[in-house]
Image: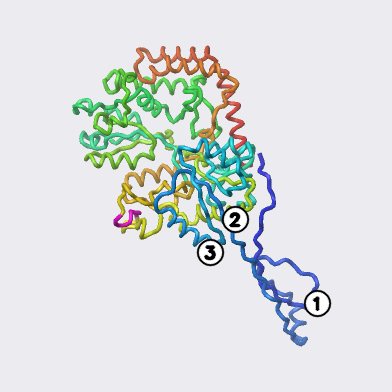
């Protein structure tokens, strides 16, 4: 769908205009970058013969100064100790750059569901709000102001340059934009984590994909007492199965019925109703069964109530899974115990991962704000100008943080990490461009390099943000979920006797539960979603 274009505020900068010919009665509009044009040759000749009369220059027209405004922002969470001091520095810069200052109010996380709607209802009391709370629903109900791309191009040049068409596409609701989204690459990549020290200890080959874990699991089983190769809840074990499904990602609200692969540019929807997907699913199931038979995976995962991560912290499992972004915290925990961390991100065979939807962080505007244009200008600087970005993310250099000799960011001397007065991610400004941030002091080179590589191969895949509307098939969904619990879970845990027979039975049960109808409807919804979220 096409985005409507509209008129936006134009900041006119008048150049010095000289009166060249006093007889001219028609004036042409000057352009800011126009250079004086050369005079025709015959005109130049006449000018040399006639007496030269110097023209009196017109007075220089200067741009009208921007009127001072106060922008009211609504953020989420709580202000850290040094927040006011940091914002004082931000406001000094903003006042100088665009003659505006910011006042902020916070909605505590625990009060978001009750207080956020109240703020939206009082549209005259705020200008800008953190817009990632039920974004699509609030936008469609008139809670936010529509943002025109003309306004972005004229008032937010840094944002216009930094934000991709796919990121703008994420924001579309009914073909319109209601949020300035995050422009940075936020990885939506799951990952398997393992004890790298044990891999090195037993000379296990490098682990690049989930299937490579077998050698590590076997070495741990054969040599380590008290450490399971992999132990955890049934969901933990099924998470490993998902790592093996050859790049296909699953919408967990309807397991195995809706799958997508970010390498597929046609946004294909697949699943166990698709004969081409069944062999992929079956191959992963056979690997899981083989590992259970070898004693590398637990046979009683349904009985385990402690998560794999918690077991890893006390040295009782060599593997666990979670989001890749937990790498830094996990690495610090492992290092404190004298262990080392390894990771295998969940990628396609082509090495592709996904970005989180750009609407995960961003600002929306009050439909009744009188300061919309100035707010756009402010956010352009706050998000994309590195000097503002660093202030909002880390505080005042020298007071809150310092840059060390390696070019990494560290806490300023005397600041206890547990009592940091301005901790990263806790000041409510999460949509600033994180791609500009330097690495932190505790980031290992392994993490830095792996993250850079992941970001270079991460794609913003539209179907990753697609939510299925189940209104037309609620009964079928309930029946499908029952089938999944009874028939799919044992297959994925590797505890069935005959994988081929079990998968065939699962497909048959899904069909009888109405999975074909659900798949057909979801394909239609997915196609419409892609159309609605693609800039034309």
Q: Which mark is residue 257?
A: none
Seen as rendered, the residue at the extreme bottom is 51
- Inter-mark Cα distance, 2 to 3: 13 Å
Residue 445 horizontal/vertical position (percent): 32, 47
Give the CA distance from mark 2 to mark 1. Answer: 41 Å
Residue 496 in percent (x, y) is at: 36, 14
Q: Residue at x 38, y 24 (%)?
A: 235
Image: magenta residue range: 408-414
* Occupied quadrant, residue 473: top right
Q: Is residue 384 left or right of residue 58?
A: left
Q: Residues within 10 Å of mark 2 (few under 14, many from 20)?
A: many
Q: CA distance from mark 1 to mark 3?
A: 42 Å
Mark nearer the N terminus (1 vs 3) = 1
Q: How is the image coloured?
A: rainbow
Q: Which residue does the image show at 55% across and 27% down from the upper left?
A: 468
| Nearer to the camera, 391 or 450 | 391
Mark 2 or mark 1: which comes first in sequence? 1
Q: Nearer the viewer, mark 1 or mark 3?
A: 3
- With 310 as the anchor, is 518 left or right in this view? right
Q: Per the image, is 411 magenta?
A: yes
Q: Which residue is mark 1?
A: 23
Q: Is residue 477 left or right of residue 343?
A: right
Residue under pointer 3: 96
Q: Is residue 181 magenta?
A: no
Q: Residues within 10 Å of mark 1 (few under 14, many from 20)?
A: few
Provide the secondary structure element on which disc 2 rests.
helix
Query: Going from the N terminus, do you reach mark 2 or mark 3 first?
Result: 3
Residue denoted by label 2: 374
Can you give x and y, in whole percent of width and height, for residue 25 in the image?
80, 72
Q: Are marks 2 and 3 in contact (CB under 8 Å)?
A: no
Q: Residue at x 64, y 67 (%)?
A: 63
């Amino acid at each position: 769908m096409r985005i409507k274009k509209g008129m936006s505020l134009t900041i006119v900068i008048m150049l010095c205009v000289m009166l060249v010919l006093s007889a001219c009665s028609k004036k042409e509009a000057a352009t800011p970058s126009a250079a004086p044009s050369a005079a025709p040759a015959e005109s130049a000749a006449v000018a040399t013969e006639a007496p030269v009369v110097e023209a009196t220059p017109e007075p220089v027209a200067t741009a009208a100064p921007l009127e001072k405004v106060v922008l009211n922002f609504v953020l989420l969470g709580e202000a850290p100790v040094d927040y006011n001091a940091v914002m004082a520095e931000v406001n000094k810069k903003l006042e100088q750059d665009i003659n505006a200052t910011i006042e902020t109010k916070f909605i505590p996380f625990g009060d978001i569901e009750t207080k956020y709607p109240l703020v939206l209802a009082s549209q005259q009391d705020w200008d800008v709000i953190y817009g990632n709370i039920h974004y699509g629903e609030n936008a469609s109900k008139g809670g936010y102001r529509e943002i025109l791309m003309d306004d972005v191009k004229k008032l937010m040049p840094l944002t216009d340059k930094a934000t991709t068409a796919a990121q703008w596409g994420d924001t579309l609701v009914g073909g319109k934009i209601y949020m300035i989204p995050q422009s940075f690459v936020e990885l939506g990549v799951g990952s398997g984590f393992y004890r790298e020290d044990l891999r090195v200890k037993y000379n296990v080959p490098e682990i690049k994909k989930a299937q490579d874990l077998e050698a590590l699991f076997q070495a741990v089983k054969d040599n380590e007492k008290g450490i399971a190769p992999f132990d955890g809840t049934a969901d933990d074990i099924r998470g490993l199965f998902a790592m093996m499904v050859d790049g296909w990602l699953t919408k967990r609200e309807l397991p195995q019925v809706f799958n997508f692969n970010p390498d597929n540019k046609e946004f294909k929807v697949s699943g166990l109703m698709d004969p081409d997907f069944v062999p992929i699913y079956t191959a992963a199931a056979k690997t899981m069964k083989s590992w259970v038979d070898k004693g590398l995976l637990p046979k009683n995962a349904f009985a385990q109530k402690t998560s794999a991560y918690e077991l890893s912290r006390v040295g009782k499992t060599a593997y666990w899974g979670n989001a890749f972004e937990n790498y830094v915290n996990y690495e610090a925990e492992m290092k404190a115990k004298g262990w080392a961390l390894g990771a295998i991100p969940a990628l396609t065979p082509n090495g592709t991962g996904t970005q989180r939807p750009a609407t995960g962080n961003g600002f929306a505007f009050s439909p009744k704000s009188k300061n919309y244009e100035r707010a756009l200008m402010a956010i352009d600087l706050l998000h994309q100008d590195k000097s503002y970005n660093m202030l909002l993310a880390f505080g005042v250099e020298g007071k809150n943080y310092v840059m060390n000799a390696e070019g990494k960011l560290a806490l300023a001397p005397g600041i206890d990490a547990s009592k940091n007065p301005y901790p990263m991610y806790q000041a409510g400004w999460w949509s600033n461009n994180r791609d500009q941030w330097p690495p932190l002091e505790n980031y290992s080179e392994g993490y830095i390099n792996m993250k850079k590589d992941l970001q270079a191969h991460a794609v913003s895949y539209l179907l990753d943000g697609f939510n299925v509307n189940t209104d037309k098939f609620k009964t079928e969904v309930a029946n499908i979920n029952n089938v999944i619990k009874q028939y799919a879970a044992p297959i994925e845990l590797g505890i069935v006797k005959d994988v081929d027979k079990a998968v065939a039975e699962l497909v048959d049960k899904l069909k009888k539960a109405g999975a074909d109808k659900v798949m057909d409807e979801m394909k239609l919804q997915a196609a419409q979603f892609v159309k609605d979220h693609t800039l034309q």
